[in-house]
Image (tube, grey):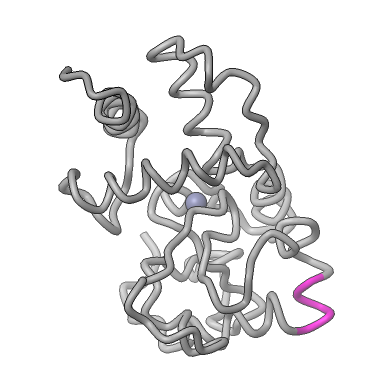
Amino acid sequence: MASRRRIETRKATIAEYWLGSSEGLDRLRENAALIDLGEPHCFACGFDATEPEEPPEIWSVWDKAALDRCHLVPRSLGGDDLPSNLVLLCRSCHRDAPNVGDPTYMLRWITGRESYGARIARLANGALGVDELKGLADSFDSERVLEAVGVVGALLRAWTGTHGGYMNDSTLEAVIAEAVCRAGGRST
Ligand SMILES: [Zn+2]
């Protein structure tokens, strides 16, 4: 295990490096374009970690977001706490991300990570066979994906015991099923 010493680097500083400098933008590639500076999202899957009550203040709004600071190169392998070696990920992505000595692999993994919207669509299709959700692509420009994610996101906050924590597929499947049932006025 890496050192348990607290990371002092502010999340706002990390966000500013990756989304506000040309070097960070270049390294984060297309994922950067999907993230609004005033609305904290997981760098990898795009999970919306915005706290609704927070004022939309660029950079400082990131400090209170439910995102983990994750090393590209772990401390145990010599990685430092500079913003260039830290990214902001949701708990699920943090748990699943590679832990190796070359930052290239982490950055490649972030770019290729299934988006949160695509994950919800996949689980909905697989678990429920909901025809209406079929064909929802993993693109954030689809209004229907955003709509589905919004409904499920609200339910996630109100109805699960793991807010801000790791969300496994089975919990997410149950939330999707519940969301569909409630939307359709049916009971489970
Ligand atoms: Zn994520």
Q: Which residues are magenta?
A: 21-25
Give the residue displayed 73% in from the left and 49% down from the top: 108
Looking at the image, residue 110 sits to the left or right of residue 152; the answer is right
Measuring from the top left, give residue 56's x and y in whole percent: 49, 84
Task: Using the image as rendered, state which of residue 72 and residue 146 is in the foreground.
Answer: 146
Which residue does the image show at 59% across and 65% down from the upper left?
Answer: 73
Q: Nearer the viewer, residue 119 or 82?
A: 119
**Residue lying at 46% horizontally and 14% vertically, measured from the top left:** 130
Q: Is residue 24 magenta?
A: yes
- Count every numbered label the image shows and give the total: 0
- Picture quadrant of residue 106: bottom right
Percent position (x, y) of residue 131?
52, 12
Asked if residue 60 is positioned above or below residue 137 in the image, the reply reads: below
Of 138 and 82, nearer the camera is 138
Farthest residue in the front direction? 185
Quadrant of the rendered image containing residue 169: top left
Magenta stretch contains residue 184: no
Above/below status of 171 relative to 95: above
Q: Position of residue 85 (x, y in %)?
A: 62, 74
Q: Position of residue 107 (x, y in %)?
A: 70, 56
For image coordinates 75% across by 63% down, the residue present is 33
Quadrant position of the N terminus in the picture = bottom left
Given residues 153 and 3, the one toward you in this image is 153
The answer to whether residue 177 is left or right of residue 149 is left
Magenta: predominant secondary structure element? helix
Left or right: 73 as drawn, with respect to 174: right
Q: Quadrant of the C terminus?
A: top left
